[in-house]
Image (cartoon, rainbow, N blue to C red):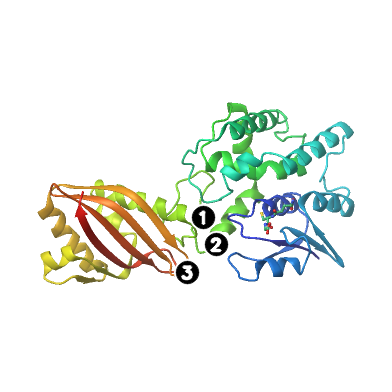
Amino acid sequence: MLKLIIGNRRFSSWSMRSWVLLRQLGLEFEAEQVPYPRQDWAAAVAAVHPAGTVPVLVADSLAVGDTLAIAETLAELFPDAGVWPADRILRARARSLCAEMHASFGAIRDECPFDVFRSGEPRPLSARGAAQLLRVDAILSAADAQEGFLCGRFCAADAFYIPLALRVLQYGLAVSAGAHAYIERIAALPAVREWIAEAGRERDWPPVAPGGIRPYHRALVCAEDALRLARHWVGCWNARRLESVLDLFSEEAVFLSPKAEILLGRARVEGKAALRAYWTTALEQIGQLEFKLDTADWDAASSTVVVIYEANLAGKRSRAAERWVLDPAGRIRYGEAYYGAAA
Ligand SMILES: N[C@@H](CCC(=O)N[C@@H](CS)C(=O)NCC(=O)O)C(=O)O
């Protein structure tokens, strides 16, 4: 049985290429994941193949590193599977596109790191990135009008461009209608949907459609996640959507705040029901409430998010901060509010 060694489905775009190729062509294999973060990640991967990157295809005594070599090996092992098109001209085009993907588009890849769960919030590209996107657009929009793929039927070329195509959705990049039509088609492929669904299960994240609204109830893994969570929290408060704020907290959450001490006579509020009662009363009494986000940061080791913002409560503006400790499902299990100098 073939084995494919892969990284995290959320981030590992190269793993996705080989995995989707195998799956979409209906080839039998099993996937073995070396997940991040793991202290000995590099050593664990290097033990399979000295290049130390994923994916690696393991076939009997062979360990093949690198997506291009994996595609060629699969074509050799399964000559009728359609890794490359049967037509010589289309085959040359497919190989050329794969090689181009392999060697190019560095600016887009650096500026827009692959993230299955990114919501589509637009990110401006540098001039280099924008020039590369024009080339990507030309490639994707030239997909075969009848068959719908880059070189006739689905083949390695499509698998190689999938992560780039999904970045267009993840980062709200502007492309032509033709390229968009191809991207939508590729995002709907069963193998692509399966990869995304499994990415959701890896960390107990609910499955999301590519480019869909990102759910907040899941583990955070980077500073950008923390910032997005903080933006969501500020937006909920400013819209006075108390239930949406409470939704971010676990049932047993504990919250500590000097404002609670003034209002309730004790700083510590325990449990979601008590939090709901406290904030309902606070909202009624305060009248005006407006938060402006300054920054948010994330400490992976302690699963802690720190949010710095400006609070305008009943017309009194002050610098403020919150510290949230998250549970494994990404909900706030402990929160603390701090108020600083007048803003
Ligand atoms: N050229 C390689 C690139 C593979 C690659 O860079 N994979 C990333 C994960 S998406 C990796 O293993 N990075 C770890 C590292 O470079 O140490 C291929 O086509 O497979």
Which quadrant of the structure image shows residue 36?
Answer: bottom right
Distance from disc 3 to disc 1, alpha carbons, whole Å, reads: 25 Å
Distance from disc 2 to disc 1, alpha carbons, whole Å, reads: 7 Å
Quadrant location, ligand no. 1: bottom right
Q: How many marks?
A: 3
Looking at the rendered structure, the secondary structure element under dot 1 is loop
User: Quick check: can you spot residue 237?
Assistant: yes
User: Quick check: can you spot residue 165?
Assistant: no
Residue 201: image tag: 2
Distance from disc 2 to disc 3, alpha carbons, whole Å, reads: 21 Å
Which of 262/331 is in front? 262
Disc 2 or disc 3, which is closer to the eye? 3
Indicate if the residue with disc 1 has its beta carbon within 8 Å of ligand 1: no
Looking at the rendered structure, the secondary structure element under dot 3 is loop
Q: Earlier in the sequence, mark 3 or mark 1?
A: 1
Q: Is residue 43 above or below residue 160?
A: below
Disc 3 or disc 1, which is closer to the eye? 3
Question: Where does the image place residue 252, in percent across and percent down from the top left?
Answer: 31, 72
Indicate if the residue with disc 3 has its beta carbon within 8 Å of ligand 1: no
Residue depicted at x 83% and y 39%: 85
Q: Is residue 307 above or below residue 343?
A: below
Residue depicted at x 58% and y 66%: 37
Three-letter amino acid code of the residue under disc 3 = Ala
Residue 207: image tag: 1
Residue 301: image tag: 3
Residue depicted at x 75% and y 53%: 22
